[in-house]
C-alpha cells in the first residue's frame, strides 16, 4: 500500500490562520466586554437632565438650616448667553460641536493612539455632549467600561435633542468652583454680573470657559491669598503659583479662540494682558451659620464630589447647635474683642479670629466660626482649614504655649510618672545651640509643674520635652489628633509652640477634649447621618475614639489647667463657680494668640491674629481670646447645671517638699510644704535631702572665712550645681563662694562697694530730705538700698535677712565712718 504524502503547512497560510483566529477571539472578547459594559449602563432618561435637587442640611434637633445647590444656580436660555462666552466654550471644549453627531472621531483617533501607546487612559476625547452625559448619568471614574457607556448614551442624546438644546443644558449644568453651578451663577459669583444685562469682556469669557476643566484648582488663587499660613513669603509664593496656573489656563482659552478664528491676534494680546478677577466683586451668598455650613459642605464634597452635593438631593443631619453658633458668631463679630488695627487692603477686618466649640465626650462640633465676617460661599475658614502645599504638607498657625500640655506636660505625666508636684529648676539652660528664654526674661528657680504651667514658664516646658524625648512627645500629640508636628524640623522649640506647620482651632479643640474626657480622644465631626432624598441611608457616622492617655493623666492635666484659669495666665476665662481648665498661647511679638479651654460640657479653641502674620504688641492669649472664650461659654452654658470634672479612681493626695518634690524632711520649712494630687503609685517614698543646715557669714550670706566674726546658721537648699544670682530663689541656695568682705585688716572697701553696702545718712542729709511732702511715686532709695541682699522667702529667711541687715549697718558705721564729726 502506497504511503500518503504529508502536506507541508506553508508559513503564509499559518500566519493567515493565526490572524483569523486572533480576530475571531478578539471579536468574541470584544462582544463579551461590550455586553458586560452595557449590563449596568444607566437607561437614557431625558428627565434626568432636569433632576437638580439641592442638599438639605439639618441641625442637631433635625430642624432645616439651609439648602445648598440650586440656590446658587440660575438657569439661562442659550440665546441670552453672549456670543463671546459661547465662542470661548466652543473653542476650548469642542470646536466642532455643531459639525459632529456627538463623537469627534478626529479627537477619538488621537486619544486612542496616545492611550494605547501609554498603556492606559491618558487623554480623553470628550465632546460637549459627552460631558453632559457624564454629568447627568455616569460616575467620574476613568475606565474603558464607563467610556463605552458614555459613547452609547451620547449617541442617544444626540437623537433626542438639538445641538442648541444640548449646549444650553451643558452651560446650565457644569460646575465653576466657589459653589457656582451654571454659567449665569458663575458670572454673578466671580464678576457680580448678569449675563442677560451686563457686558462680559473677552478676558472674563475666557476665564469662565477655562474653569470647568478643574474648577477647584483654577479658583483656588482666590483663597490662597488669604491663607492662614504663618510665613508671609510662603503665602505670597503659593498665591502667585495658583494665580499663574489660572492665568495660563485663561490664556490657553484665548489662544484657542484665536486659532479657531473667533478673535484676532490683537484681541488675544489685549485680553491676555488683563488681570484675573479678584474677590471684590464676588457675589455675597447669605445663608445661616455660614462657616459651619461651609465646613459641612467641604466635608461632603471631599467624600461624594460636587455633583452629588449640589444636585443629589442629600439630607445631611449635623451636630450644629444654633444657639451656641449664634453666640460664637456675635462674639467674633464684636470689635471690642479684638486689638484695634486697620483693615487690610481688601477691606477685611484685621486681626482676624476663629473659634471652634465641641462636646468632648461625643466629638460633636457645636459651633464653627472661621472669621469675623463671612463674604462668600465656602470662604476661607480659619477655624478648620490648613493650607495644603504641593507635597501634601499642611500649614496652620503657631500655637504658642497652648501646645505645652500636648507635647510637654501630658507626655511627662503619661510616660515619666511625673505630676503637678514634680519639681523642675527654672534656671538659665542651653540645649546645644538652643537657649530658651522665659517671657519677661526672669528665672523662678525650683518650682512645681503646677506653678510652671500656671505661669506658663518656658524653660520648664522645654526641660520636660527633653526629658520625655521628642519622638515620644510627637507620638503623644498624634494620639490627640495633632498631626503637623515634625520631630526633626521643630526640635525642642516645639515645647513653646515652634511648630513649623502650625495648627488650627479645630484640631486644638479636639486635642484638649481628651483631657476633659478621661483621656479618650474623640475625633471632631459635624455630620451624624446622610440620607438620599427618598430616605435611603447613605452613611451613618460613629465617633472615632481612642484612649490617648490614662484617665489619671487627663485628670492631673485638667487640675493643673484649672489653676492656670483660677490664678494664672488664663484668669480672664474664669467662670466663677463653674470649673474651667484652659491654657493661653502667645507667640513671639503676639503674632498668634490663643486660648483653649474646657468645662465638663464643652471645649473651645479661640485664635486671634492677622491673616498675614503681624506683630501685635500688648496682645496676649490671656486677653482677647480668653475674653471671647468666656463670652461664648458663659452664655452657652447659662442654663446648664454646674458639675465637676469627673475624678477617676487611683488619684491620691499627699504633702511634699516644694523644692525637691520629695516627702518633707526634718529641715523642710513649713512654707515649703505643699499638698497636691498624684496618680496612684507616683507618690514619692524618699525624704527631702535638699534642705540642709549651714553656717554662713551674717553679712554676705557666703561661706564664712577665718575673719568672719558674725556668723549665723540657716536652712539652705543645696543642689549639686550653682545658679546665678538672677534666679529668684538664689538666696535659698547653699552658697558656694567664700566671703571676701572680711579680711585681716577689717572690711575690704572694694568688696563692700561690690556688695553695694550703703550706710545711714549723715544727720544733715537726713534733715534735708525731711520735708519733701507726699508723692504718688516711690522714693528713690539711695541710702536704704538692700539690693545686694538676695531675695528670700519664708519666715526663717526673713529673720535671717533682718539680722544680716543689722550686722551690715553696724560694721559699715564702725569701719568707714568713724570720724564723721
Image (cartoon, rainbow, N blue to C red):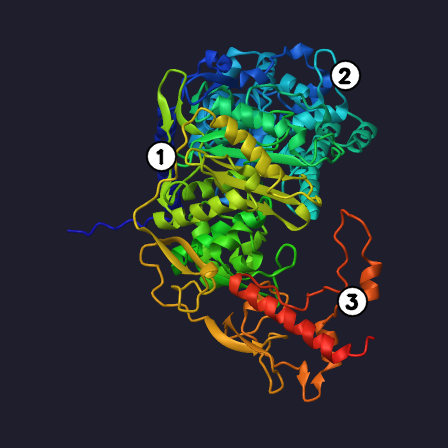
Q: Determine the residue located farthest toward the left in the rendered image.
A: 1
Depth check, front residue: 460 or 254: 460
At 42% across and 26% down in the image, what residue appears? 640
Check disc 2 and report the residue beneath it: 199
At 40% across and 67% down in the image, what residue appears? 665
Query: Label 1 vs label 3: CA separation?
Result: 114 Å
Check disc 3 and report the residue beneath it: 761
Across and down, in percent, residue 58 comes to 45, 20
Helix, strand or loop for disc 3:
loop
Query: Label 1 vs label 2: CA separation?
Result: 55 Å
Q: Earlier in the sequence, mark 2 or mark 3?
A: 2
Label 2 environment density (alpha carbons within 10 Å; few <14, some 14–19, many ≥20): few
Depth check, front residue: 263 or 689: 689
Q: Which quadrant of the figure contains the C terminus? A: bottom right
Helix, strand or loop for disc 2:
loop
Q: Earlier in the sequence, mark 1 or mark 3?
A: 1
**In front: mark 1 or mark 3?**
3
Amino acid at each position: 500500500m502506497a504511503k500518503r504524502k504529508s502536506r507541508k503547512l506553508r508559513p503564509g497560510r499559518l500566519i493567515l490562520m493565526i490572524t483569523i483566529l486572533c480576530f475571531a477571539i478578539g471579536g468574541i472578547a470584544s462582544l463579551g466586554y461590550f455586553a458586560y459594559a452595557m449590563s449596568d449602563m444607566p437607561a437614557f432618561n431625558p428627565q434626568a437632565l432636569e433632576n437638580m435637587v439641592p442638599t438639605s442640611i439639618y441641625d442637631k434637633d433635625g430642624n432645616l438650616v439651609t439648602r445648598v445647590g440650586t440656590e446658587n444656580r440660575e438657569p439661562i436660555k442659550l440665546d441670552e448667553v453672549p456670543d463671546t462666552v459661547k465662542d470661548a466654550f466652543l473653542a476650548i471644549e469642542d470646536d466642532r460641536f455643531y459639525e459632529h453627531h456627538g463623537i469627534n472621531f478626529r479627537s477619538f483617533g488621537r486619544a486612542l493612539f496616545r492611550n494605547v501607546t501609554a498603556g492606559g487612559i491618558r487623554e480623553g476625547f470628550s465632546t460637549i455632549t459627552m460631558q453632559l452625559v457624564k454629568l447627568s448619568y455616569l460616575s467620574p471614574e476613568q475606565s474603558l467600561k464607563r467610556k463605552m457607556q458614555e459613547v452609547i448614551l451620547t449617541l442617544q442624546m444626540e437623537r433626542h435633542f438639538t445641538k442648541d438644546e444640548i449646549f444650553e443644558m451643558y452651560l446650565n449644568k457644569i460646575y465653576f468652583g466657589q459653589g457656582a453651578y451654571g454659567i449665569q451663577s458663575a458670572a454673578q459669583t466671580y464678576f457680580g454680573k448678569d449675563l442677560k444685562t451686563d457686558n462680559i469682556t473677552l478676558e472674563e469669557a475666557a476665564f469662565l470657559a477655562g474653569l470647568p476643566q478643574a474648577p477647584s484648582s483654577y479658583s483656588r488663587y482666590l483663597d490662597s491669598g488669604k491663607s492662614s499660613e504663618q510665613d508671609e513669603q510662603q503665602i505670597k509664593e503659593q498665591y502667585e503659583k495658583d494665580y499663574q496656573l489660572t492665568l495660563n489656563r485663561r490664556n490657553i482659552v484665548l489662544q484657542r479662540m484665536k486659532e479657531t478664528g473667533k478673535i484676532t491676534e490683537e484681541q488675544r494680546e489685549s485680553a491676555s494682558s488683563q488681570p484675573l478677577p479678584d474677590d471684590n466683586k464676588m457675589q455675597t451668598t447669605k445663608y445661616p451659620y455660614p462657616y459651619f455650613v461651609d465646613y459641612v459642605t467641604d466635608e461632603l464634597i471631599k467624600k461624594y464630589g460636587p455633583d452629588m452635593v449640589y444636585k443629589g438631593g442629600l439630607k445631611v443631619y449635623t451636630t450644629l447647635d444654633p444657639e451656641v453658633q449664634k453666640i460664637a458668631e456675635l462674639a467674633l463679630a464684636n470689635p471690642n474683642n479684638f486689638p484695634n488695627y486697620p483693615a487690610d487692603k481688601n477691606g477685611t477686618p484685621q486681626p482676624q479670629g476663629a473659634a471652634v466649640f465641641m462636646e468632648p465626650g461625643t466629638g460633636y462640633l457645636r459651633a464653627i466660626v472661621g472669621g469675623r465676617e463671612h463674604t462668600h460661599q465656602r470662604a476661607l475658614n480659619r477655624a478648620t482649614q490648613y493650607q495644603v502645599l504641593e507635597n501634601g504638607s499642611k500649614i496652620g498657625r503657631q500655637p504658642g504655649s497652648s501646645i505645652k500640655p500636648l507635647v510637654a506636660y501630658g507626655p511627662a505625666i503619661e510616660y515619666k510618672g511625673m505630676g503637678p508636684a514634680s519639681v523642675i529648676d527654672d534656671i538659665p539652660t542651653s540645649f546645644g545651640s538652643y537657649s530658651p528664654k522665659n517671657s519677661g526674661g526672669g528665672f523662678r528657680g525650683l518650682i512645681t509643674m503646677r506653678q510652671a504651667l500656671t505661669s506658663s514658664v518656658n524653660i520648664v516646658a522645654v526641660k520636660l520635652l527633653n526629658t520625655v524625648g521628642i519622638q515620644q512627645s510627637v507620638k503623644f500629640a498624634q494620639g490627640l489628633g495633632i498631626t503637623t508636628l515634625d520631630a526633626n524640623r521643630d526640635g525642642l522649640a516645639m515645647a513653646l509652640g515652634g511648630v513649623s506647620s502650625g495648627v488650627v482651632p479645630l484640631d486644638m479643640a479636639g486635642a484638649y477634649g481628651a483631657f476633659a474626657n478621661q483621656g479618650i480622644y474623640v475625633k471632631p465631626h459635624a455630620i451624624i447621618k446622610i440620607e438620599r432624598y427618598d430616605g435611603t441611608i447613605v452613611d451613618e457616622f460613629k465617633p472615632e475614639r481612642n484612649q490617648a492617655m490614662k484617665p489619671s493623666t487627663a485628670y492631673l492635666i485638667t487640675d493643673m489647667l484649672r489653676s492656670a484659669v483660677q490664678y494664672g495666665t488664663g484668669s480672664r476665662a474664669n467662670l466663677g463657680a463653674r470649673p474651667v481648665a484652659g491654657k493661653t498661647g502667645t507667640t513671639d511679638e503676639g503674632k498668634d494668640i490663643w486660648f483653649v479651654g474646657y468645662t465638663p460640657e464643652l471645649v473651645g479653641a479661640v485664635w486671634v491674629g492677622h491673616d498675614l502674620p503681624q506683630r501685635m504688641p500688648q496682645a496676649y492669649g490671656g486677653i482677647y481670646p480668653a475674653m471671647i472664650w468666656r463670652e461664648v461659654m458663659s452664655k452657652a452654658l447659662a442654663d446648664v447645671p454646674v458639675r465637676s470634672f469627673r475624678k477617676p479612681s487611683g488619684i491620691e493626695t499627699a504633702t511634699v517638699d516644694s523644692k525637691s518634690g520629695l516627702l518633707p524632711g526634718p529641715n523642710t520649712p513649713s512654707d515649703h510644704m505643699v499638698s497636691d494630687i498624684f496618680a496612684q503609685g507616683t507618690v514619692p517614698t524618699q525624704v527631702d535631702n535638699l534642705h540642709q543646715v549651714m553656717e554662713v557669714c551674717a553679712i554676705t550670706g557666703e561661706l564664712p572665712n577665718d575673719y568672719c566674726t558674725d556668723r549665723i546658721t540657716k536652712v539652705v537648699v543645696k543642689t549639686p550645681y550653682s545658679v546665678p544670682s538672677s534666679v529668684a530663689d538664689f538666696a535659698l541656695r547653699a552658697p558656694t563662694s567664700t566671703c571676701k568682705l572680711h579680711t585681716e585688716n577689717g572690711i575690704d572697701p572694694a568688696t563692700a562697694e561690690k556688695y553695694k553696702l550703703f550706710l545711714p545718712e549723715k544727720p544733715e542729709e537726713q534733715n534735708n530730705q525731711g520735708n519733701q511732702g507726699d508723692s504718688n511715686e516711690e522714693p528713690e532709695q539711695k541710702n536704704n538700698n538692700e539690693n545686694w541682699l538676695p531675695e528670700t522667702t519664708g519666715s526663717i529667711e526673713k529673720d535671717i535677712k533682718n539680722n544680716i541687715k543689722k550686722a551690715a549697718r553696724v560694721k559699715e558705721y564702725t569701719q568707714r565712718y568713724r570720724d564723721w564729726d
